[in-house]
Image: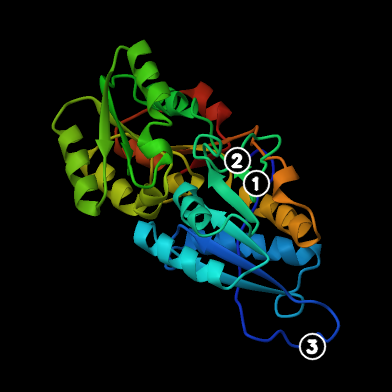
Amino acid sequence: MRRRTFITLIGSAAAWPLVARGQQNERVRRVAVLMAYANSDPEGHVLLRTFAEALEEIGWKPERNVIIERRWAGGDIDRMQRFAKELVAMQPDVILANTTPVVAAIQRETRTIPIVFVVVSDPIGDGFVASLARPGGNITGFLHLEASVGGKWLELLKQVAPKLRRAAAMFNPATSPDRGNYYLPAFEAAARAFGMESIVAPVGSDADIEAAIASLASQPDSGLVVMSDGFVRVHRKTIIAATARQKIPAVYPLRVNAQDGGLLAFGPSYVQLFHQAAPYVDRILRGERPAELPVQVPTRFELVINLKTAKALGLSVPPALQARADEMIE
């Protein structure tokens, strides 16, 4: 097993009682959090706890000088919109928003309450900020992936499965940046460079996921690139189980995907992203404006390889790639 240290990036929440006890003179501040994860997802709770603990380390004590309200959307657009209305109506001091569609839902409800986003790919293209250096409005935060990673995912998959002749890009248009088009150009360019067929596989349900992977399995030497979006994140176990059953090599954007049984994962640490969000929330609570807080961009990424899954697929991970890995799961 190999690990490296990465840039810290952070974000997320706790609970919101009506009265904070034990404080008579200190003003109690309110932080709202809207997570794209399902409430039943342990990964979402790890991220939320990371944010809350980091905020407490800075001096914001739950039920003493800060109250944190959390909502879980479970990758569902309707829930995101409903919870966005609910949280904005509470008039919190700042909102932590997880993923592009969550930020979009909250932005429709307020242009004044400060918003710190975590895990958004294209904040300029989605109209959240005017520029990364000077966001200019009520929104700032932590970008997690640039569009070029769409090609990097396929490159890594091809190294582990060199016989691949085609690959599908899986995403949900309703929850993926630019309806899936953000990563697709780089993915398709990489497929052309490798002489591979590129396939677009939009999904919106577990049944869609099963059907798309079964279709891939009907054609020899096929692989899967799972794009980064809230829906596929919530439904990752369905994807991992289907690819294992159908013997399809796949690459994912998150460490947890490889830990759950996926072949490969490449992307920034979400734990670090959520941790880094706490100081931004702190700065806003102390009077700074989101308009003047630059959007932060990760510069280092983690590669995780599941050797057990590779063996089950009959694949041999090249030693050079193993040497680059930050973690190998055996």
Give the vertical position of 189 relative to 60 (above or below).
Answer: above
Give the vertical position of 194 relative to 136 (above or below).
Answer: above
Give the secondary structure at mark 1: loop
Which residue lies under the disc numbered 3? 22
Q: Residue at x 43, y 39 (%)?
A: 177
Side of 316 where 141 appears, left or right: right
In contact (CB < 8 Å): disc 3 and disc 2? no
Q: Amino acid at mark 2?
A: Val
Percent position of residue 90, x then y: 58, 73
Neighbor class of circle 2 (other Cα within 10 Å; few <14, some 14-19, many 20+) is many
Lower position in the chain sequence, tag 1 or tag 2: 2
Question: Dividing the picture into quarters, in which one does residue 153 lie?
Answer: top left
Residue 251 in view of the camera: no
Give the secondary structure at mark 3: loop
Which residue lies under the disc numbered 2? 129
Side of 96 where 243 appears, left or right: left
Quadrant of the image for the N terminus? top right
Q: Amino acid at mark 1?
A: Gly
Percent position of residue 176, x then y: 40, 42
Give the vertical position of 193 relative to 244 (above or below).
Answer: above
State the residue lying farthest toward the left.
Answer: 218
Label of residue 137 in the image:
1
Q: Nearer the viewer, residue 330 or 219?
A: 219
Q: Nearer the viewer, residue 258 or 267?
A: 267
Q: Amino acid at mark 3?
A: Gly
Neighbor class of circle 1 (other Cα within 10 Å; few <14, some 14-19, many 20+) is some
Q: Residue at x 36, y 38 (%)?
A: 179
In contact (CB < 8 Å): disc 1 and disc 2? yes
How far apart are the alpha carbons under marks 1 and 2?
7 Å
Percent position of residue 145, x then y: 53, 35
Residue 78 in view of the camera: yes
